[in-house]
Image: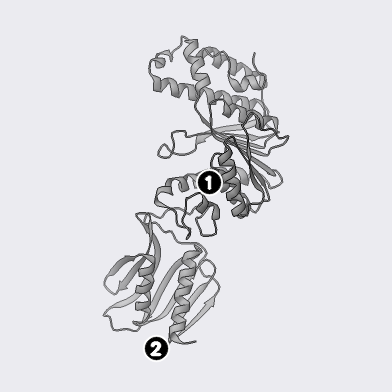
Amino acid sequence: MTSSSSIAQFTAGIQESLADRSFIKISLGNYKGTAAGLKNIYVRLVQIKREEKLSFTIRYKTRDVTKNYDLKEGIIFLVEQLNNGFAMNTLFTSSMDLILERRGSSEFVCRKKGPSLAAQSSTSHNKEKTRLLSAAPDKKYLFDLKITDERGEVFKNAQDKYKQINQYIELLSPMLNDLSKEQVQHVVDMGSGKGYLTFALYDYLHQVLKWDTKVTGVEYRKDLVELCNGIAANANFESLNFVEGTIQEYDVPHIDLLIALHACDTATDDAIYKGIKAGAQLIVVAPCCHKQIRKEITHGKAQNELDFLLKYGIFLERQAEMVTDGIRALILEYFGYKTKVMEFISDVHTPKNVLVVGVKNDKLKVDQQAVLNKIRETKAYFGISYHHLERLLRLEQ
C-alpha cells in the first residue's frame, strides 16, 4: 500500500467514525519535523454553538495552541500535519484503533487493532453527559420527525426536543430496570401525539434493553396516526403501531406499562383508570390542565386557612394542580401502587412538569379505608364534591 493510500485509509476511517458516532479522539505523536518545540497534536470532537467541530490541541514544549475547524476543514488540516513530520498517529474509536505509522522518510503504513478506549468522549466544552439515546444516521425516525438531518446531526431548533426525549428515557430507565422483559410485554402510550416519546421509548426498549416489547400509541387525530405508522414502517419498527381513537374508547385486556403524557384534564384520569383496570405493572402520567378540580374548588368556596389563595388566579391554578394530582396518587396507592411524584421536564421546555408514577407492588400493605378517609377529608377541606378518577373507579363515599 502506498503512503498516499495509507493516509487516505486513515482519513476515511476518521470520516466513517464521525458518521457512525464511534469517534473518540485522534493522537498525532513522535514528531520528526522542523517546527521548533512541537511535540504532539490531540484532536477531539466538540460542539460549539450547537455545531460540531474538530478541536486541535497543538502541544509545544512551552505552550499549547487550540484551533477549531469544521469537520471538512479539520480533516484537510489534519492531513497537512500528517505530511509534516508526525510518525505515530492513532484514531481511537469505540470499535477499533486505526494506526498510521511512518516508516522511513516518507512511507506510511496503516493498520487496525482492537479498541483501547471504551467510552466516547464528550462533544461539549461543558462536558455534556452521555445520552441514553444518541443521534445517528441510522436513527431514521429522528430524521423523519425532523429532529436530525441525514447525517444524524441534531438541528439547532430541535435541541430542546432532543434533550426532552433523553430526559424522558433517563427517568423511565431505572423504573424499567427494576422490571424484567417478561413483565413488560405490552406498552401503551395514550395520547401519543406526533410520537416523539413513543418512538424514543421503543428505540430504548428494543435497541438498548434488547426487549421484544410491543408498543402501541393511541391518538385521536387520524393524520398523526397515519404519519406515525409511516415513520414506524420506514424505521422497521415492527412491534410498534399507532391506532386511532380516544383514551376513553381504547380498550385492551392487558397492559404492562401505561403512559399518558400531557393528556388534558380528566383524560389523565381516564388513562390511569385504564391502567389500573388492565393490571399495569407501571403507570406513568404527566398531567395537563386541571380544570375539573379547579371548577370544583371555585364553586365549593370552602372556608379554610388557604382560602385567601382563591383571590389570585395563578395560586388557584397551582392549588388545583396539587390537589388533583395528590388525590390521583392516593387512589393509585389504594390499588396497591407505590406512588411517587417528580419533575419531568424543566419549565424551559414545557410548563407541565409533574410526573406521577405508580409501580405495582403486590407486597405493599395498604390501609384502604385510611386512604378513602384521606380522600374524603381532602375533598371536604377544599370544597370538592367529586374527583373524576374516584368516580370512574366507584370509590365515592
Vertical position of residue 88 compared to residue 202: above or below: below
Q: Where's residue 299, x and y in %? A: 49, 11
Left or right of 132 in this view: 254: right
The amino acid on which the numbered mark 1 sits, given as a three-letter code, is Glu
Q: Where's residue 290, x and y in %? A: 50, 24
The amino acid on which the numbered mark 2 sits, given as a three-letter code, is Ser
| Residue 42: numbered disc | none
260 or 322: which is nearer to us? 260
Q: For residue 314, what is the image quadrant?
A: top left
Tag 2 and tag 1, C-beta contact below 8 Å? no
Q: Which residue is drawn at 51% across and 73% down?
A: 97
Left or right of 225 in this view: 27: left
Left or right of 277 in this view: 11: left
Q: Which residue is drawn at 73% across and 34% down?
A: 253
Q: Where's residue 125, x and y in %? A: 36, 57
Q: Residues within 10 Å of mark 2 (few under 14, many from 20)?
A: few
Vertical position of residue 308 compared to residue 260: above or below: above
182 or 195: which is nearer to us? 195
In this rendering, does residue 208 appear at all?
A: no
256 or 223: which is nearer to us? 223
| Residue 106: numbered disc | 2
In this rendering, does residue 5 appear at all?
A: yes
Q: Name the residue under label 1.
A: 170
